[in-house]
Image (cartoon, helix red, strand yellow):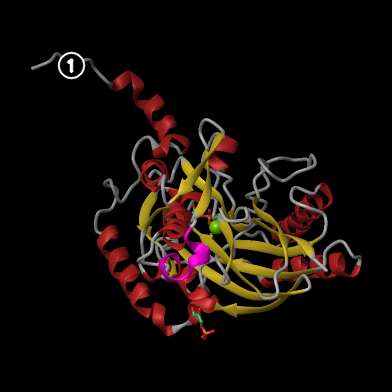
Amino acid sequence: MVEKYTLSIIKADVGGDVGHSSVHPELLAKADEQLAKAKKDGLIVDYCRGLVGDDTALIMSHEHGVDAPNIHEFAWKTFEAMTEVAQKLKQYGAGQDLLSTAFSGNVRGMGPGVAEMDIEERKAEPLLCFLADKTEPGAWNMPLYKMFCDPFTTAGLVIDPSMHDGFNFEVHDLIEKRKIIFSCPEEAYSMLAFIGAPGRYVIKSVFRKEDGMIAASTSTQRLSLIAGKYVGKDDPVMMVRCQNGLPAVGEALDPFAHAYMVAGWMRGSHHGPMMPVGFEDSTPTRFDGPPRVVCYGFQMANGNFIGPRDMFADVSYDNARAEALWAADYFRKQGPFEPHRLSLEDLEYTTMPKLMEDLKSKWQPEKDE
Ligand code: 13P
Ligand code: 13P
Ligand code: MG
Ligand code: MG
């Protein structure tokens, strides 16, 4: 019998402890309590509560499909309940990611990040859930490209005939609100022209071409574009299915052996290295960073999350961490100068417009020399 499930990660920052570094145990206890109740009530099949920095992720399996109002409402209410605790403890930015005051059927566009997929659970279903803090959704572009399109990363693209057809990438344009499918490897160069600009073009999902099976899904919400001003970084999540005609677990993790450069870090306004870390090291403090990623590994069994395994606790990411720390020092020496600081265009949703406005009358026209 085919077992069908929906996998949902819905995440939010509803208050930091201390500053933007972590989540207070009482908030996590509230999330755990709500998740346990939802499982007991039969709303969800199973769950794992994830954490990275000041962001809490509700990793859930259920049978209600993608975008299900009852699941989204449950997540929203859970974040509201956590916010109440955060307010009581005067946590930093209590309710930060709950941009709307009232829930209206779906958390998309309301602040929390969402990555979902409908799956037919395979005989063995290895699942990787990546959670990042102090960065934006486009941060998954490079690793997803490497996993599903780069034979120097994924040996299976060469060795496993069932992967030879390649993968379809659904890319979203977050500014114009439109989407496109790139068929790879044939359209890889065209796709790179877009996804190489990760502040605007973001890979939403990846599908195996052979049978259309979904292989990866990400959260693409950009808080500043929703709120029209800087309110915190998006801190995206992603899930990737592995093995059997998909990248092996080790292939899906290999892109993170390089601490590649992402936008985020302090005040969401700086470039910095993406550091893979184990659960123990997931709370960013240096200049509120550097940006980091944790990976929760599971074997799914009848909709249950068997795990999590702490995938980046492996010593084989020590060099990536060392590279990230070296790069962090290198970037920091540049202080307020680009390209450590994001470009003016990227700062459009911070305090920059206000500063421009304040100084407007002081600028004098200048003749060409
Ligand atoms: P095992 O032989 O350990 O199952 O590994 C096979 C594989 O595909 C590793 O990527
Ligand atoms: P978060 O998006 O993780 O809340 O961080 C915001 C920030 O401004 C860090 O300096
Ligand atoms: Mg925060
Ligand atoms: Mg955060």
The vertical placement of 222 against 153, above or below, is above
- Please identify the residue farthest to the left as the structure is shown: 369
**What residue appears at the point 55 percent right and 37 percent down from the top-left corner?**
179
Q: Secondary structure at mark 1?
A: loop
Residue 109 in picture, x, y percent from top left: 66, 40
Q: Which residue is mark 1?
A: 366
Instruction: Tell me the quadrant of the picture where the C terminus can be found.
Output: top left
The image quarter containing residue 16 is bottom right
- Please identify the residue farthest to the front as the structure is shown: 161
Drawn side of residue 26 relative to residue 130, left or right: right
Q: Is residue 2 magenta?
A: no
Task: Respond yes or no on whether mark 1 lies under 8 Å from ligand 2.
Answer: no
**What residue appears at the point 87 percent right and 67 percent down from the top-left corner?**
37
Number of labels in the image equals 1
Residue 293 in picture, x, y percent from top left: 49, 66
**Dominant SS type (magenta):** helix
Drawn side of residue 87 relative to residue 62, left or right: left
Q: Is residue 233 visible?
A: no
Residue 20 in picture, x, y percent from top left: 53, 60
Point out the stretch of residues depicted in magenta.
157-164
Instruction: Tell me the quadrant of the picture where the N terminus can be found.
Output: bottom right
Q: Is residue 178 visible?
A: yes
Closer to the camera in the image, 115 or 104: 115
Residue type marked 1: Glu
Closer to the camera in the image, 301 or 340: 301
| Residue neighbourhood size for the residue with mark 1, other residues' Cα within 10 Å, grouped as few (<14), some (14–19), many (≥20) | few
- Please identify the residue farthest to the right as the structure is shown: 41
**What residue appears at the point 41 percent right and 63 percent down from the top-left corner?**
274
The vertical placement of 265 against 246, above or below, is above
